[in-house]
Structure formats: structure tokens, C-alpha cells
Amino acid sequence: MIRVMHNHAVTTDLLTDANELRQQIDRVVASTPVIDVHTHIFPPEFGGICLFGIDDLLNYHYLIAETFRSTRISYAGFWKMSKTERADLIWKTLFVENTPLSEAARGIVSVLDAFGLDARAPSLKEARAFFKSRNLPDHLDRVLEIARVSDIVMTNDPFHKAEANAWKNGGHSDARFHASLRLDTLLNDWPAAARTLAHMGLPVNAGFGGNTASELRRFLDNWISIMQPLYFAVSLAEDFKFPNDDARDRLIREVVLPTAREHGLVLTLMVGVRRGVNPALRAAGDGVGKADVTALERLCSENPDVRFLATFLSRENQHELCVAARKFNNLMPFGCWWFLNNPSIVSEITRERLELLGPSFIPQHSDARVLEQLIYKWRHSGELIANALCESYERLLKSGRAVTRNEITRDVSRMFSGNFREWVGLKSSAARIKAVS
Ligand code: FIX
Ligand code: ZN
């Protein structure tokens, strides 16, 4: 008879064989639903800004940047082309005339593979016919099933006209999609935001005169009631400083933090992007810079009652972020953002975080812009996270403590959804359904 005394596992549950341990980790990682905490994906109800299919997949700014390294077409010539013509050029350049070795190009191959499509096809004829044949709501369900994504957190900008209209026209009814309220326009281009808001009739001015701060809080309160966001988010350049003698500092202190406190919202910081390094590449023209992590440390220390999610774009900031998270338990590191979302670096970052933070971090987000990207972003990251976990569990075994299947399941679900749920107060879908029924 098997008896469990306290939570001491009986020997049969303990995974003492390295191969069995490996298999169990792969099985758990491949079957544990994940919350994708940062994406640029929208539900079908949002119409044209919901991107899917081969032409949108190929017109991904990662692939556009890579295409310009292997073609002599001018920027002007490229942007004059239609989306379909650009997709044909990108396919020919990166997948026919060259081997799709880059992570973003391999991603397309993984997506085509998931749907049994030929990644060596000379043209996009077959792929276009396939994606054209899909019923979008069913396709969405299938993609989320393959990617094992249970919940998607969008990036929602109240200054984005098409999106603002979508919300004003009723938003969406898909409980798998959650909003995040993006503050880039407000915090990174305040004079322009002040003009836009004044133009919309808000009594605000760039000089913070009158009731500007309270009016801005009312503006955010209004969008919070419309979007029900899980968190505030902002991307910041590498020269972000806090404290600092600028409008952004005042906006953070007098508007964002008080509103976050009032609504119990987390503030998400994505630090280290240099926008428009090469404007001719449009969305593909952004770069990276090493940032000053002490700005985040001061935000965390001055606001112990506010929770922060943070990711840095520069590889050189990753260790500092881990150490900052050891100092401030109101700081949750997440994801291997953008130029870091490559196998060699995801492995490095995940190992470092496991060694410094145990399972108390959110290993990845997809940053997907096109629906089917979820498939490759999570398939690729899942394998890398499983490798890093296996190394940690094997090391633990060698040190004299075996783990059980349940413990692996507990650790993986904590990293894939538990940490985020707890951090932003997101009930499980079962609890949400129970709450409304
Ligand atoms: O600021 C962001 O949310 C970035 O992720 C985007 O601006 C970027 O274009 C992107 O898609 C990165 O993957
Ligand atoms: Zn993003």
C-alpha cells in the first residue's frame, strides 16, 4: 500500500532516472496551458487589426528587416508594393533564394509544418489557398489549441484610432483575450498627447496647468472601465531615468501610479528600445540600447505597494534585472523580449533566472502580432524552457533531492500562468465562468 506522510513523497513518485525525468519535463511543458502575457494580437471582432494568414506572417517586421539584408530593392520601392507583392518578395528572398536559418524565418517553417504545408514551395499559392479556406473563429481555436495558449494579453492603445473605435463599438466577447492599457503615447510623447487630448475636448495642457493631472486620471479611469485592463504598460528607451526632471516623471508620479493604486493595476515596463533607428524600415527600424536598471529599482523601492512587471531589451541588462528582482518582491521579471527571443539567448536568460529566482518569474511572452505566430513562438520557447528546467532538476537530483511528477507540474504551471494570475489578480477561467454563472 502506498502511504503519503505529510508532503513527503513516497519513493515511487520520485524521478531518480535522468531519462524519465527528461521525458516527464517534456510532457509537462508540452501540455501545460500558458498565459501569453504580452502580444499585439486582437480578436476577430476587432476586424482589420486582427492579423492572420501567410501574407501577414511574411510581412512581419522581423522578416522585413532580414529581407533588406538579402535584396537590393530600395525602401521606397518596397513600401510601394502591395502586402501580397511584399510577401512574395520576402518568401523568394528568405525561403527560396536563401535557407530560412534565422529564428523568425524558421518560425514560418514551424507554422507551415503545423498545418502540413510545404516549406520548400517555390511560391505561396498553396499556403494562400489554405489560409483563405479557414473559418477565422475555428482557426483561432485551432491555433490556440496547437500553441497551448489559454489566455492572450493584448496591447491596447487608446490613442490608436481603429482600436479605439473597436472598443467604442462594443469591444469583444472572447474571454480568452485580455486588455492591457498602453501608455507609450502619453509617457513618451507628452506634448503630442496633450494636443490630441485637448483636441478631444479634455482641459489638459502640456504645461500641466489647471486640472491636467486629475483630467488625465479621469481619461485613464474611463479607458479602464472600457477595457478592464490587467495592467498598464509602457515601452521606454534605454535612456529612461527615474527620478528625472521631466514631464514623464510628473505623469508617472501624479497620474499613472495613483491610478494604478486606485484600481489595483500592475505597471509593466519594457525598457531599452531605441525607436526609429532606421525610419525607412518603419516598424522594422527600431533598435536596442543598454538601460539603467537603477531607474526601475527606485520605482520599486519608492512604491512598495505597487506591483511591477518588467522586461529589458538589452542582453546586457538581464543579470541586473534578476538581481533587482531579488531585492524587490514587488518586481516580476517576464519574457525574452524581441531581439532576445532567439534560442541561444532564451536558454541563457532562462537558466540565469532559474538559478537566481527559482520558479518566481514569467519565462516568456510571444509578442506575437499575427495569430499563427503563437504556434512557433511557444513551440520554440517551450523546448528551450524544458531544456533549462531539465538541467536544473538534474542538478538538484545530483545534489541529493529528486523531484516528483507533481512538483514539476506545479513549477511549470506556476511559471506558465500561476505567477501572472497571482500578480495581476486574474482568476482562472473556471473561476471566472463560476463567478458569472
Ligand atoms: O513595444 C513593444 O511592445 C514591442 O514589442 C513592439 O514595439 C515591437 O515592434 C515588437 O513587435 C517586438 O516584438
Ligand atoms: Zn510588444
Image (cartoon, rainbow, N blue to C red):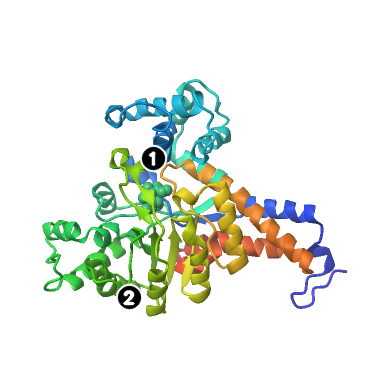
Q: Which residue is mark 1?
A: 61
In depth, the one of 66 and 212 nearer the eye is: 66
Q: Amino acid at mark 1?
A: His
Residue occupying the point 28% across, 74% down: 253
Give the quadrant of residue 418.
bottom right
In depth, the one of 303 and 9 nearer the eye is: 303
Residue 173 visible here = no
Label 2 element class: helix
Specify the label residue 262 is tagged with: 2
Residue occupying the point 55% across, 28% down: 117
Q: Amino acid at mark 2?
A: Glu
What is the total number of numbered labels drawn onto the structure image?
2
**Label 1 beta carbon less than 8 Å to ligand 1:** yes
Label 1 element class: helix
Instruction: Give the x, y percent position of residue 395.
Output: 73, 62
Instruction: Give the x, y percent position of residue 264.
Output: 38, 73
